[in-house]
Structures are given as structure tokens and as C-alpha cells.
Image (tube, rainbow, N blue to C red):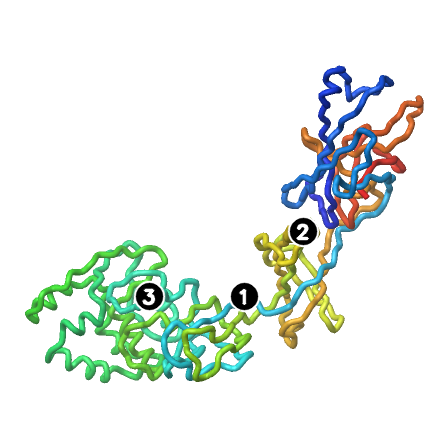
Amino acid sequence: MNSDRDPAETMPLRVAVQEESEEVRNNEVDLHEPTTRGRKKAVVLSIVAVLLATGVGAGLLWAGGGGKTPGPEAGPKIRRTAVVKTDMSGIREMEGTLGYDSVRSIRGTDEGVVTWLPKQGATVARGEQLYRVDERPTVVFFGSTPLYRRLDTLGSVGRDIRVVADNLKAVGYDIGQQPAPGTVVQQRAPVDQQASANAGPSTAAEPDQETAEPSAGPPPSAQGDQAGQGTGADNPAEDQTREGRSPTPARQVTVREGDGVLTEGLMSAIKRWQKSLDVEPTGVLESSDVVVTRSAVRVSEVSAQTGDAAANDLLSVSATTKSVRIQVETLDLGTIKAGQKATVMLPDGTETAGEVATIGTTIKADQEGESGAGVTKINVTVSVEDAEAVKGIDAAPVQVRFEGEAKKGVLAVPVGALLALREGGYAVRLAEGRSADGRSTGGRLVPVDTGMFARGLVEISGEDIAEGMKVETTA
């Protein structure tokens, strides 16, 4: 059986399940052989919607017999159709929406007042401010792990610290040497606690030392980091003992792959970076100081105003790239695959090449059908290969054409003619007729192999299948 099938217009398939009624069993009537003896037939046909793209089925039952015609809710109507020889093509067109990728809302996390916001449509790159609260900037860093805590403890280890280290290095700051994976470092007390414990004459010189550092803007001088090359693995207890203080217990932490370490060198770089932003150079980072994105972002919407409370939705951002988003019903997914070529037809009538980037997870549409159940859909994203072709379009409805296989002169029937057999495989049921010897052929199942699905038809083949043969199908 050909597994490369495309149920583009798939209709519910019928499953043939024959059960003997109590009366038939008592009279020992063989349902599989023709007979002239009078009898009542009790045949229950289980109709299922077979989602050939995903292998998922759901049943819809109707019953016939006893001389009664099934009502509208009992099941689908059955009609006769002929096996036809035709050309089939897998080319399909679907509606989608062209727009910017990965839209997300940015919410303020600090108490305070919004004092600056970017303009809609602005692009914000690595190291640039996205907004300001109480005149303190929140800056864009690139990465995959957000800052989820206050970075104030020398020797702290984590992926969020790696984001800070990588970004400061990328914009030109010397962060010193980062400990390799497997290194055991000493995690000291937070900077604020150290400052309280160190209150006295010895702390008065600290601000002067920081003031004496070179200019905060990149590129920083090596001199500014010479005092910060430590990894946090030095002995803090020895330093505190010299000054007559009780040592602060240090916790040992092992550096894992992908982790960064808040070393003295990194904290020194943070201080110089803070100076360049006109922020007090404490070396401490708040989680609200940085917004982590995958790449440069475009401001798609500004929802706040200056003077608003900061702890609300402030703006929305997106990637600077565009793609087409299509919601595809599960039955129409067919042979659409990641990496498949497509053509995007733009509103001005021009066309540009595209490619299926992702096939997302199943979603449930808001609207409900006649059955009361939401329509199951899949998010399909098509990337646009030529960014210049869509440069002047922020968002617009478009058509997407998916190329597919084409076959000529194949035998085909409506998809509703297929019967999914309980033992596996498919068949069609012959419509009422007479064989050459005068015997009735109605109701006989003929096994078939399936091929391409397109526009509500399915390609079939088999030893007993011929053009013009009459079969049953759902109306």
C-alpha cells in the first residue's frame, strides 16, 4: 500500500463491521454466502472519520435493516459512483497571513514609572535599551535563558550568568577568564551583605577605587580587570580573618556545561558597563535590567505611555524576519512536510519563493461546528526566502501554493468510498448489480491499495478494480 498519500480533501471513511444478530445466530445464517432463505438482516456499519495524516480515528455510527430508512442523525447517505480514470495532482493553495515572526509581550517587573519608550517599528539590537523605568534602562541581551534572579553573589553559577558574560564580551568588554566546566568555585555572600559586614574605614576607599577605573564604555582597558581575574575560588575567609572579622561560610558549586560564573572579572565588567549607561556602578544586576531575546527585535506595538506604572504590559516585540502563518485543518495537512518548497502569492500579484519552516502543535479553533466540537488545526509556518520581496509589507493576507506529486491516467474514487477493514487495509463496496452469471454483486467488498489523495479523490488499484465499476460512497 502506497504510504505517500495526501488526504487533502479527506471525507469520513466507512469501516465495515458485520455482527450477527441474535436471530441470525439462532437460525445459523451465514452472512458471507448468498442465500434465498427468508431472514432478517442486522448489519451494523461503524462509520469513522479516519485522519489519514495522523492515524487518528473517531466513530460515527448508523444502523440499517428492519425495513427502516436511517434518519438524518443515523448516518451518512449512501450513493453509487463509478471508478474513473483521471489525472491527479497534489498542488494545493491555502490562505495564510504574512507577518513578523515570534511576537511576544514585554511586561515591566519593577515598581516605578515608565520614563521612556521606543517608537513602534523601531529595531533594537544587542546592548541597546528597550525602555526606561525611573530613568534606569532595560537593555536587550541575546540568548535563550532570561535573567530570573538578582545577580549579586560572587561565585554564583548558572546559564543566566553565561548570557551576561557572552553579551558583555560581544559588545567589547573584557570579562576575564571564565572557569571551565567541572571547576569547583566558592560562592560567597551577596555583595550587599559583604558591604554591611565590611562597614568601616576599609570600605571608604572602595568607591574611590571604582572611580579610578578607566572609562566605562567599550573597549575597556586591561587595567580595569586586573583586580577581577579571580573565579570566586580564592579563600575569602583568609581575607576576612586578616581584618579581624569572622569568616563568611562559602558554598562550593560545580560549574556545568553551559554555565557562567559571576567572577570578580565579570562583576568588574558589569560595573564599567553600568557606567556607560549612566547607572550606579554596583556590579549587581537586577532581573529587570535585561530583556533576553533570540536576536534583534522589532517593536510591533507600544501599549504603555510615559508616566504609566511599570508593572504592566509595556510593549510587544517580534523578530525582524517575516514568515507566513497558516492554520491548516488536520484533514488537509496531507503530505505537507518541513522543508517542502512553496510559493507565496503577495497582495500585489507577485510571487516569491518560500519553504515550510515548522509544522506546529495541534490547536483547537475557537468556533464550534455543528457537532459542537472545535475544529482541530495545525499551525504551519512558511519562511520567505527573499526578504526584499516583502520589505514593504508589515502584515497582509496571502495565498500559499504547495507543490506536490502529479499522476496521469490513474483509477480513482471519492474518498468516501473507502472502507477501513478491521483486519487492516482498505476496500470498496460494490453497488447493486448483476454478474455475468446473473448473481447479485451488491454488497461485496473488494480490497484495494490506495495511492495519492487530492481534491476529494483517492487513487485505488487492485486485481478486481476496473474503470466504470460501480461502488458505494457517502453522499
x, y (%) of residue 126? 44, 74
Residue pictured at 71% horizontal, 21% vertical: 22
Which callout, 3 or 1, points at the residue further toward the start of the chain?
1
> In the visual, does 282 lie left or right of 447?
left
Residue identifier under label 1: 102
Task: Name the amino acid type tagged 2.
Answer: Leu
User: Which numbered marker is on residue 333?
Assistant: 2
**CA separation in Å, label 3 and label 1:** 24 Å
User: Which numbered marker is on residue 144?
Assistant: none
Residue pictured at 66% horizontal, 66% vertical: 97
> In the visual, does 435 lie left or right of 151?
right
Along the line of sight, which residue is nearer the eye, 328 or 165? Answer: 328
**CA separation in Å, label 2 and label 1:** 23 Å
Residue identifier under label 3: 149
Which callout, 2 or 1, points at the residue further toward the start of the chain?
1
Element under disc 3? loop
The reply to whether residue 459 is visible in this rendering is: no
